[in-house]
Amino acid sequence: MASPAADPDQSSNLDQAASDPHPAAVTFVTTEHFTLQGARAATIAEATGRATMFLGAVSGGLVALGLLATASDTGAAFYAFGLILLPTLAFVGLGTFDRVLQSGIEDYGYAQRIAQLRGYYFQHAPELVDYLLSVPPGQRLRVQGMHGGRWQRFLTVAGMVAVITSVLAGSAVGGLAAAVSDGSLAASLPAGVVAGLAALVCLLLFENAAWRRAVAARLFEGVEGPE
């Protein structure tokens, strides 16, 4: 007796069921996506909070320095206070710069993992392409705000802190030169400008090297980072 022919619809349903992701995998991926979004928010909040505290310290210190200048008429007390305050603020800026740079790189790692999860969604649910923004793997980080470009480093929190820290360092060196040269602008201004520019170049080179290491050590192939 001949066996009955297989039902094409039944075979199609079996193939579809075999290709569908396991429910446990779907639960894990969606939970991981939610967790990574929360981790990104935490790193951004920490970087913003640290930058806010640093700017508050700089603002308060400069106000105090201005009040002392009014009271002492830029005398010895003014130079002494400035040469203590400005290096201290620059040191705080260095610590803030290093930590917000770490937070930015950590956020980049989270964004990489989210981009990879989006690829999983589109692979197993291609019907979502019409409703979600589907981009090539090399562009998925740009959708999350990870832009590249030569000037992008100045737009980050670490870049902003680097600029302010460099100004503080240059001001400290300029103040020291003014104190030594009896308030000579010809001596203090060039010294401050050179020191500030040197500090800024060093910090930006450090930031650029850190980002290059992070991009070179990307977690997934095909998910590129900012240039």
Image: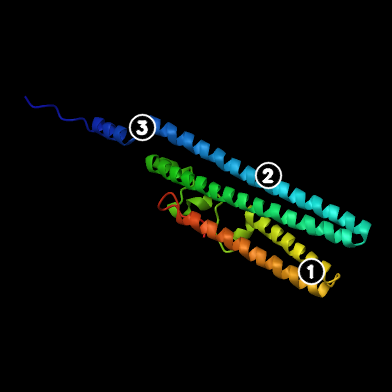
For residue 175, above or below residue 32: below
Which residue is tagged 3?
Answer: 22
Q: Nearer the viewer, residue 130 or 66?
A: 66
Please tell me which of labels 1 and 2 falls first in the chain. Answer: 2
Q: Is residue 146 at all visible to an observer of this figure?
A: yes
Q: Position of residue 68 (x, y in %)?
A: 89, 55
Count of all numbered marks drawn on residues in the image: 3
Q: Amino acid at mark 1?
A: Ala
C-alpha distance separating marks 1 and 3: 70 Å
- Identify the residue at image location x=56%, y=62%: 149
Please tell me which of labels 1 and 3 falls first in the chain. Answer: 3
C-alpha distance separating marks 1 and 2: 34 Å
Nearer to us of marks 2 and 3 is: 2
Give residue 49's mark: 2
The residue most toward the left is 1
Local crowd at mark 1 within 10 Å, few (<14), some, or many (≥20)?
many
- Identify the residue at image location x=66%, y=63%: 200
Q: Position of residue 64 (x, y in %)?
A: 85, 52
- Identify the residue at image location x=83%, y=67%: 179
- 1 and 3 marks in contact (CB < 8 Å): no
Q: Secondary structure at mark 1?
A: helix
